[in-house]
Image: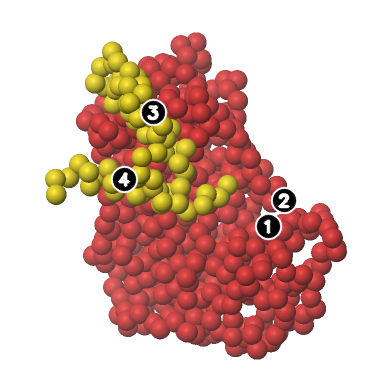
Amino acid sequence: MTIASAKLEIKPNIIDPDGFYNELLNAHEGLSEAQSTALNARLVLILANHIGARDVLSEAFRLAKAAGTPS
Amino acid sequence: MTHIFEIPLYPYERSVDQDSAEPAHHQVVVVGAGPIGLATAIDLAQQDVPVLVLDENDRVSWGSRAVCYAKRPLEILDRLGCGDKFVEKGVQWNMGKVFFEDRQVYSFDLLPEEGHKRPAFINLQQYYLEQYLVERLRDLQAEGKPIELRGKSRVTKVAQSGERVDLTVETPEGPYTLSADWLIPCDGAASPIRALLGLDFVGRVFEDNFLIADVVMQADFPTERWFWFDPPFNKGQSALLHKQPDNVWRIDLQLGWDIDREKEKQPENVIPRLKAMLGEDVDFELEWVSIYTFQCRRMEKFRHGRVLFAGDAAHQVSPFGARGANSGLQDTDNLCWKLKLVIDGKAPAALLDTYDDERILAADENILNSSRATDFITPKSAMSRTFRDAVLQLSEKAAFARPLVNSGRLSVPSTYDGSQLNGADCEKMPRRSRPGSPASDAPLGEAWLLDQLGNNFQLLGINVDLPASIEIEGISVASLCLTTAAGEQSLLAERYLGEAAQAVYLIRPDQHIAARFESYSEAAITQALRTAIGQRVKEVAQ
């Protein structure tokens, strides 16, 4: 399997953003903090595998870190 | 029953050196008669280099210790003339099962590539490996090869001066001194020689303890590797079950850091753990128990002038992935032909610096792989445990998560990419056989390719005429000429030709590929051989 080199999509790409966000929150409904953390970890792994491209994943790591760092 | 590790296989005997007026001089002295020291000595003696092995003990090691041997080391043991014994005795396995908490999450088949004489792995107690190597050493002695093994001979002093290494050897009858042109310490992770020379050994300590037990039982467990993460019988820790010959099962139980090691080793503490793992009604006998901690570290350089460290003395890894003894055997494979050429004056001493380059590359690969496995098995933070558990949970439902499960990436040989000894490459040919790589085996009718390679520089010609042998720099290079039928997709063609119609490979004595060409030219082979024996290498100041 070869995965073409690609760039991380940072423009809006989700159809129905409000519906997606609601589904994300619903997935955590009723979970303890530990269960939520575990769910998020599984989600990260599933989504990362779907993306596959290592350079895109590295870019996502950088963006996630940068967004949480006060400039 | 008397175990092989209880019998002195090379009891102390007084040597002529002890009665010599002047310290006796030896060409090569190997310290340590473990697997690596013995393999080194056998390799050198096969090439008629006189070698003396000194060991502080007089018998093989106690307990199973290194139990998993990969294909490449088995090929090296073939070259050392004793591969069949290991493979006949060893247990072959391909299936593995992974358990998480109370259930199996998946199983896997190693699916070894076809067309190799040797299997991907065998399990065998280390004491058998040592026993068979001692037997091979005795056979070589009977053939008149210059090899000697002295038991109960502990090196207590070592000094290097100019062209010589001086040693003091302690024996049951007192000390004596001798000297050597070359010293090869294969004296293990705690290497006394390394300590005597005051050399560094830096790296990472893992705060964990593992209980290993050899258990004899007549159980009907299949011949598989079972690995448990966080099982009910060892909460929060891991466990491994592996079959060895003679109905001996190897069990590794992770215990964590904060434990009383002496207490945990007592049978009254070990047996309940094993019962919880194997089932209350399984009959077993405890043969050996040990507790180990481990580190991932290496010496900055393996070569120190005329002292050449090999095996665990030079580099230490965690046991996950079976990269200890397996990589040590590859050290000797790399070192011995180089030392032989330097001793014979056919190659510059700088060739020995490439032992450092090539085997440090391999050691770093092994340390990286075993550190990653350790980090998966023993998560170092709450979040790394969260991700580890997430991977294991997903592995039950989705195939994508299984390659992320890391209970040890099993030992594979290193390709010496970027080595100063590598010569010309040909891009039409398969990447797996590029310069620096270990030659892949391939079936040749009833025979095997690797059985016809090794111990000397050789030319391998496929669909091309080569001179029977050529002489370069006083080194005789013989040819092996093979053909592939037109249109036939043989494994030989797949592994060595690729898109090329014909090929000429220059192969090193350790069966690694030095250079490859589409056609034969004596000038090009001469250049590649000169490169492969280190003529372009600048010696590092010692």
Q: CA distance from mark 2 to mark 4?
A: 42 Å
- Are circles 2 and 3 on residues that touch, CB within 8 Å? no
Quick one: which chain is red? B
Q: Is residue B380 left or right of residue B409?
A: left
The subunit carrying tag 4 is A
Residue position for label 1:
B441
The chain containing the residue under callout 3 comes to A
Q: Check disc 4: other Cα within 10 Å, few if <14, some if 14-19, many if 20+.
A: few
Residue placed at 38% from the left, 75% from the top? Answer: B306
The colour with which the image depicts chain A is: yellow
Labels 2, 3: front one: 3
* Badge 1: residue crowd in 10 Å (few <14, some 14–19, many ≥20): many
Residue B354 picture location, percent across and down:
44, 73
> Which residue corresponds to the image point at 72% horizontal and 79% vertical from the top-left?
B519
The residue where tag 2 is placed is B115
| Residue A42 visible at all | no
Q: Residues under labels 3 and 1: Cα distance?
A: 56 Å
Three-letter amino acid code at the position of disc 1: Asp
**Viewer-proximal residue, B30 or B79?**
B79
**Which residue: 39% across, 82% down?**
B539
Relative placement, left or right, of B183 versus B108 is left
Q: On the image, numbered disc 4 is attached to which residue?
A: A61
Which of the marked residues, 2 or 1, is nearer the chain's N terminus? Answer: 2
Discs 2, 1 touching: Cβ within 8 Å: yes
